[in-house]
Amino acid sequence: MHGTLTILLRRAQFGDRAAEQAAFSRMNDRLLRLASGLLRRERAGHTLETKSLLSETFLKKLRRLQVPIQDREHYFALVGHAMRQVLIDHSRYKRAAKRTDPLALQAQLFSPDLDVTTTLAVRDVLTRLRSLDRHAAEAIQLRYVEGLTIEATAQQMARPAWRVRVDCEFGLKWMSSQLANVRPTD
């Protein structure tokens, strides 16, 4: 069984989604225990849930992994490392979000009363954001330009809602910093 799982993991690493699903279903209980154990070490009231941590780990980290998987234990070590990275990223974004009010940034950047110069500058900065972080740009586009809710944006992007919030907060802050020198025309 261990040999078969290693083969599935290697096939999954080369893009075989059926092998990825088969390997994931075989290891699901252990992966959930690993995620749960890591979350127990986090502060009380953590906004990331066990299944969200696991899915974010797969979407963000493991599908882009360039290291060849040697066996199932090596795989679990890689998963554990990737989960810790997701938790660190999540913590950084949460701390950054506390420093700036996203609603104020949204009103500042996407007000219908913006002058032409500022509107064109916002469009240009959104285009530049797309080359920096396409997820943040897509979240901004769906959420603030097209007016979708967080949940609808998350569904459209096939990402967890907490991740969409983080993408929006980052995108708004980055765009605001890029637009700091734009002066409206009278």
Image (cartoon, rainbow, N blue to C red):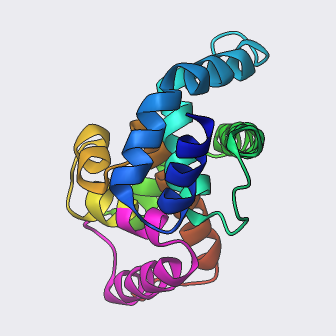
Q: What kind of secondary structure does the magenta stretch mostly adopt? A: helix
Identify which residue is drawn at 43% across, 88% down: 124
Q: Does the magenta run of residues contain 131?
A: yes
The answer to if 151 sits in the magenta stretch is no
Residue 84 position in % (x across, y down)? 76, 38
| Residue 70 position in % (x across, y down) | 74, 54
112 relative to 126 in the view: left or right: left
Q: Which residues are magenta?
A: 112-138
* Residue in the foreground of this view, choosing between 115 and 186: 115
Q: Nearer the viewer, residue 19 or 31?
A: 19
Q: Is residue 40 above or below residue 182?
A: above
Identify the residue shown where x is 68% and y is 69%: 66
128 to 15, vertically: above or below: below
Q: Would residue 141 be visible to someone looking at this image?
A: yes
Whether residue 103 can be seen here: no
Say whether residue 110 is left or right of residue 12: left
**Position of the N terminus by quadrant:** top right
Image coordinates for residue 50, horizontal then vertical, percent: 54, 22
- At x 28%, y 68%, the residue is 113
Q: Indicate the quadrant where residue 37 lies.
A: top right
- The picture quadrant where one finds residue 112 is bottom left
Q: Check the picture and name the quadrant holding the C terminus.
A: bottom left
Q: Looking at the picture, how far across and down is residue 185, in whole percent?
A: 42, 89
Q: Residue at x 57, y 59 (%)?
A: 10
